[in-house]
Amino acid sequence: MSAPPSSNRQTGRKVIAQNRKARHDYAIVDTYEAGVVLTGTEVKSLRLGRASLVDGFATIDDGEIFLRNVHIPQYEQGSWTNHEPRRVRKLLLHKEEIARLVGKTKESGLTLVPMALYFSAGKVKVELALARGKRSYDKRQDLARRDADREVARALGRRSKGM
């Protein structure tokens, strides 16, 4: 009889930061989950829930994917070992996934955009979206569609209440 293994690891998915504006600016084609190579002070800063994906994007250089322009503020209790807030961070994906992404970004002008940064089983992961930029008229159409759907939902609600 052995006792169940005790673990301090987190289970589930704890979201640190989301890029809400990305769904407005881009049409999402596909999403991927990637690990992120971080330093100790970056992880500590992320555990405090501090990060910004607003200007972030990913690039493919020499068969490797890098996350650029993602802001992880310096850890306040960090010393000389602290990190640069907007440094380039390597992403961890399988070679087949990277090859697929290289093909899609080269041929059809798609972009890699970080959608969310989160902890999954104690590890920091990023949800990368393969996205196509929307034009202003696409954004207007989306807003009009959303408003119409909201109005329909209101009318159905009023009708079900007998008003």
Image (cartoon, rainbow, N blue to C red):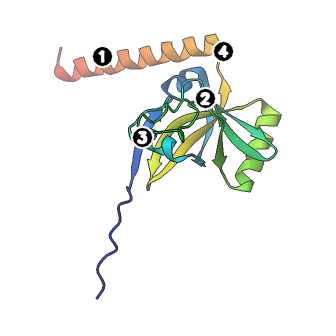
Q: Which mark is residue 37?
A: none
Q: Distance between the residues labelled 1 and 4?
A: 31 Å
The location of residue 15, given as percent across then percent down, is 42, 40
Considering every residue shown, the one lying at the far bottom of the view is: 1
The residue mark sitting in front, 1 or 4, is 4
Q: Reading the chain from its start, which is encountered first: label 4 or label 3? A: 3
Q: Which amino acid does label 2 sit on?
A: Gly
Residue at image location 39% in from the left, 53% down from the top: 12
Q: Distance between the residues labelled 4 and 3?
A: 29 Å
Q: Distance between the residues labelled 3 and 1?
A: 35 Å
Instruction: Give the answer, above or below, for where 1 lies relative to 57.
Output: below
Which residue bears the numbered disc 3?
15
Q: What element carries label 1?
A: helix
Classify 10 Å Cα crowding around label 3: few (below 14), some (14-19), many (20 and above).
some
Q: What residue type is labelled 1?
A: Ala
Residue sitting nearer the eye, 83 or 9 = 83
Q: Reading the chain from its start, which is encountered first: label 2 or label 1? A: 2
Q: Reading the chain from its start, which is encountered first: label 2 or label 4? A: 2
Which residue bears the numbered disc 2?
56
Are circles 3 and 1 on residues that touch, CB within 8 Å?
Answer: no
Instruction: Give the answer, above or below, for where 25 lies relative to 104.
Output: above
Q: Reading the chain from its start, which is encountered first: label 1 or label 4? A: 4
Considering every residue shown, the one lying at the far front of the view is: 80
Q: What residue type is labelled 3?
A: Val
Are circles 2 and 3 on residues that touch, CB within 8 Å?
Answer: no
Are circles 2 and 1 on residues that touch, CB within 8 Å?
Answer: no
Which residue bears the numbered disc 1?
155
- Image mark count: 4
Q: How far apart are marks 2 and 1 (CA)?
A: 39 Å
Which residue bears the numbered disc 4?
135
Q: Which amino acid does label 4 sit on?
A: Arg
Residue at image location 43% in from the left, 33% down from the top: 50
